[in-house]
Image (cartoon, rainbow, N blue to C red):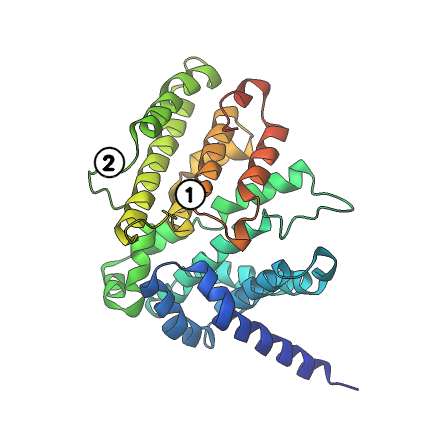
Amino acid sequence: MQDPASETWAMDLFLMSHFTSSTMQTLFPRMDVLNLWQTVVVADAAFHPFLLHGMLALSSLHLASLRPSGQRARYTWLCQNHQGHAVSQYRHALEDVKLDQIGPVLAMAQIIAFLSLATLSDNALPKEGNPVSSDDGFKDVLALSTMLRGVPTILQGSRDRNRFKDSPYGIVMSVYKHIRSGTLYLPASTRSRYELLRTDCLSDLVAAGNINETAICRKAIDDLEVVHNDAVRNATGNALPDMLLHVDPLYLMKWAAIVSSDFITLLHSRHTAALVIMGEFASLFELVGEKWFLKNWVNNVLDIIRAIIAQPGLKWLRS
């Protein structure tokens, strides 16, 4: 009879091998970021269990996506098991991040981002039997922001933590910080859409005279436009001539990390305008292209929002 501990170790070794040889290459389009993960991050996972569990969870979900739906159960369970360990330990690490933990914690934030995205893809949502309810699906939508809330705080730490910029992990900061170059990379039609959201949409969906809710939503729209512009700028700067423009999903997820806690509160209350803005954020992932962790993702998120949003908000959602 095989030793269960030995079997678990062998499976974890297999999952880690798959992560380093395959999964990793599907996540990071930038070679400098991929190189960081192939060297420094993988090595650091041996000393930070939350990071190791995160890698194993993402590897499991990637393997599940490569199997027919009837053969995914084992890998889905492995993902949920490792993700449970990773998230609980990650939250504990966020409570008091030491200098030598900043890099691994930010690397884990990126894994959390991919796991949050993949959870709402066709590769994770059941299509047979009992489908996910709109309430459960909306909890997963909310997790896109709530799981990344600690990242801006880490990057705004003490002067001593500025040494992080000169570490191998320093490149991670380029993903989470606004570029704000002043150059507009979005077409006029897209900028007009954002202006329409700030004016007519909020006028329609926020109660007259509610200056606070209007300001909260307008700030979320402003932040989304900046993140959108930065993401396109980055993709344009790294694209080869005649190359199809594909935006790095981590640049888009930056909005989920920086959006205000007041806006998150509005989302929790299913505020109509806030849901429209969340739908606008979801629609940006069409720019990423085909990825296993985004299979039918945009449609799935918009369907969840359509199922719970008040009727006046439907006309403002992207089709």
Q: Which residue is mark 1?
A: 287
| Residue at image coords 25%, 46% | 179
What residue is at 33 percent from the left and 59 percent from the top?
172
Which residue is at 39% across, 29% downward?
Answer: 216
Question: Is residue 34 rendered to the left or right of residue 170?
Answer: right
Residue 312 at x, y percent in the picture: 55, 17
Pick the residue in front: 257 or 201.
201
Q: Badge 2 is on which residue?
A: 184
Look at the numbered disc 2 and give the secondary structure of its residue. loop
In this rendered view, identify the residue nearer to me: 223 or 280. Answer: 280
Tag of residue 26: none
Residue 67 is situated, as x and y percent measured from the top left of the image, at 66, 61
Lateral position of residue 146 relative to residue 82, left or right: left
Helix, strand or loop at mark 1: helix
Instruction: Say whether residue 296 is left or right of residue 247.
Output: right
Residue situated in front as seen by the camera: 42 or 143: 42
Identify the amino acid type marked 1: Leu
Tell me the mark number nearer the camera, choosing from 2 and 1.
1
From the viewer's perspective, tell me whether residue 154 is left or right of residue 77.
left
* Vertical placement of residue 251 versus 204, above or below: below
Q: Which quadrant holds residue 220?
A: top left
Q: Name the spot of residue 145 as percent of width and height, x first.
A: 47, 45
